[in-house]
Image (cartoon, rainbow, N blue to C red):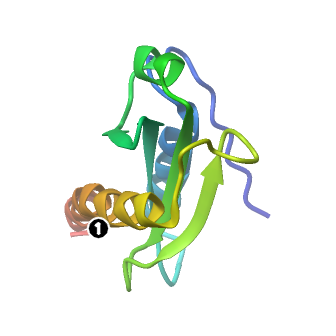
């Protein structure tokens, strides 16, 4: 059994993507054999505008937040979480835009994972 505890000490942005990325990094750092990692990106939506990695202030001003999780191999979406059951103004086109935008921001996270593992295990 593996148990990972994530404790928020201080935050000025939504915790869910930070926690998912921390857990993924911890699993990679553990040396366990895993097939793929994940990276999460949170976005705040307001008036069809998207703010990636929003601060608490952006979240308060938004109509809602969206966290998208991507897999490290295909970079496809493997999970979506919203802070509301129905996110006002989230059309299918805006959701597609969020998925593409989030993927662009997830790629550097995967790069950081690779670099960190290369340093740790070589």
Residue shown at the point (42%, 58%) measured from the top left: 94
The C terminus lies in quadrant: bottom left
Q: Is residue 104 left or right of residue 7?
A: left
The N terminus lies in quadrant: bottom right
Give the quadrant of residue 107: bottom left
Q: Position of residue 9 (x, y in %)?
A: 55, 16
Q: Which residue is mark 1?
A: 121
Establish if 60 lies above or below 108. Answer: above
- For the residue pair 89 and 27, the one nearer the viewer reads as 89
Residue shown at the point (67%, 39%) measured from the top left: 83
Q: Is residue 103 left or right of residue 96?
A: left
Tell me, yes or no, if residue 40 can be seen here.
yes
Q: Residue furthest right?
A: 1
Q: Position of residue 45 (x, y in %)?
A: 45, 38
Q: Residues within 10 Å of mark 1 (few under 14, many from 20)?
A: few
Q: Position of residue 34 (x, y in %)?
A: 53, 79
- Secondary structure, mark 1, is helix
Residue shown at the point (39%, 22%) measured from the top left: 55
């Amino acid at each position: 059994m593996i148990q990972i505890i994530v404790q928020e000490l201080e935050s000025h942005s939504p915790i869910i993507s930070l926690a998912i990325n921390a857990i993924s990094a911890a699993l990679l750092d553990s040396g366990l054999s895993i097939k793929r990692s994940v990276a999460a990106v949170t976005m705040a939506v307001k008036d069809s505008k998207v703010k990636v990695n929003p601060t608490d202030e952006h979240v308060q001003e938004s109509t809602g937040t969206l966290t998208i999780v991507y897999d490290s191999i295909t970079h496809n979406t493997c999970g979506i979480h919203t802070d509301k059951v129905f996110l006002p103004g989230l059309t299918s086109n805006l959701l597609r835009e969020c998925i593409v935008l989030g993927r662009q921001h997830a790629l550097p996270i995967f790069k950081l994972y690779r670099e960190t593992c290369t340093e740790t295990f070589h």
